[in-house]
Image (spheres, rainbow, N blue to C red):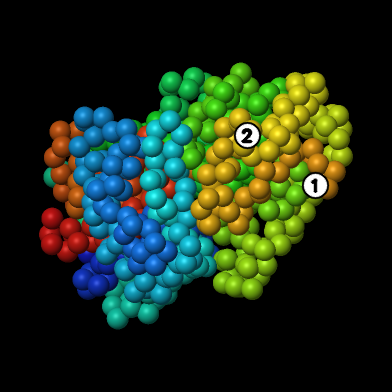
Amino acid sequence: MSKKVYKGDVIVIGGGLAGIVTALELLNKNKKVILLERSPREKFGGLARESFGGVFMVNTPHQKRTGIRDNTDLAYADWCSFAQFSDEDVWPKKWAEHYIQRSREDIYFWLRRHRVNFFPVVHWVERGYDVPGNSLPRFHMVWGTGQWLADALIQALEKHTHKNNLELYFHHNVQNLQSENGAIVGCDGVCEKSGEDFSAQAEAVVVATGGIGGCLEKVRNNWYEPWGEPPDVILNGADPHSDGRMHDAVENLGGKVTHMDKMWNYAAGVHHHTPKFENHGLSLVPLKSALWMNYRGERIGPMPLISGYDTRYLVEQVCRQKEKYSWQIFNWKIAKKELAVSGAESNDAIRDKKLFAFLKTVLLGSGKLVEKLTQDCPDFVVANSVGELVEKMNKLQGNDAVSREILEAEILRYDAFIDRGAKYHNDDQLRRIAQLRGYRGDRVRTCKYQKIIDSKAMPLIAVRSFVLSRKTLGGIQTDLDSRVLDSQGEVISGLYAVGEAAGFGGGGSHGLRTLEGTFLGTCILTGQSAAAGISKGK
């Protein structure tokens, strides 16, 4: 069978957000672009398409309209606090600073020019536990979720003045890079739909293939060593095509790949009710009024686990347990007000821009979602008493690990604090709930001191939660033009990396943690930088 050969000015490997932005900006420079994507066309946009669509930005008009007085110095300090960079993290720090300085102009206004708008209320996430995080709300949610974000930019490609300069190829699995005299000049692979081999040639190649989160074997092999062995069960919250193959190809050609043990996983993963691949998981947004228990039914602590402060801390604490899965205990009333699933798929009112339907869920709760998950998700257990709940929890897990006496005592102790009144709430979870409800973005979706055992809030619900893979914070090291660097810090001619493949800039611009909403933003910035660098001949 003959090999298909493509030729252009630039090859972009990967059709996620970073690849799309790179291609779009290259078209603005009248470059001939070949974009190769392994997935079918309906998945054009990658994980960004499936995301909730939150974007971290600093000093925006949205913030100013709601009285949030942000500034770049404060935001950079918050970023570095969460990142805990080492002295060797020169390029990650530069990318972090670049993001903070350019998020308003190159992300916020750039997206607005492409018909992307945001909720009027800016959300406040990753406030920090013992490590300070976001001092102010910066999480701007796209109206239409990540699906509209992807569609808006895809439409910009399709309607571009130079759209004839773009060649789009789906089902194209790139397997290696071509090198001549130390420069990267193309790539080879196979079309998985036809079985035909192909070769693509260009003056520049941009790697935009995501991270390793879709390959659970690589997630385990790169597990953060201080946490011990990885959990027995890890759910896949990425995509099987995010397998790190291009990381290996770049490394084989001398490129530097760093910080691959730094990952952004989630602690509240559950099995997808209609899985599309093996170990397919959903990421629940942990309920703030739920009690988070270990495998025995003991409350994980001493600092109670509650979302909104430090996602990495939640994963770390679950991984420090003897059995590295957990339970969340709550009731129907709590679930109706607080239960949510991250991503476009489970947020149809926002995704489809149905304002009335969205306002209805805010005012009346998400009863439809609760019913769906309690009926169809295998990790949900519903009961009318603690004894029945424990029996079902143990049956689900296939052992007798959960103790009724322990679980009931934990619940009653928590409920007793609520009965004593707010001025006697000597419990860190209740204190944090009070703080969360002080901000309007959290108040509408957080219960006001709701007991677990409450005859008016039944039935009881337990959710078995697993660590879920998501993002790879490390990656291919790049400079501020998104050029790939070798182990000596020298540029590899013709080779660029963007988005998650580049560790979201510099091989790890987030360090240990992210302030959330920064993934989409870094995909945009690194794509813009690559296109600008290529256009300048860098």
Instruction: Classify the position of the C terminus by image quarter.
Output: bottom left
From the top left corner, tell me how far across and down residue 39 is, in percent.
49, 57
**Amino acid, disc 2:** His
Q: Are marks 2 and 1 in contact (CB under 8 Å)?
A: no
Determine the residue positioned at 71% across, 43% down. Answer: 450
Disc 2 residue crowd, few under 14, some 14–19, many 20+, Cα 10 Å: some
Query: Which secondary structure, mark 1?
Result: loop
Determine the residue positioned at 38% across, 46% down. Answer: 135
| Numbered label attached to residue 425 | 2
| Numbered label attached to residue 457 | 1
Determine the residue positioned at 30% across, 39% down. Answer: 80
- Which badge, 2 or 1, is on the more N-terminal residue? 2
Query: Please, is residue 316 above or below residue 530 in the view?
Result: above
From the top left corner, tell me how far across and down residue 518 is, in percent.
38, 51
From the top left corner, tell me how far across and down residue 461 is, in percent.
77, 41
- Residue 185 visible to an observer of this rendering: no
- In this picture, residue 322 sits left or right of residue 483: right
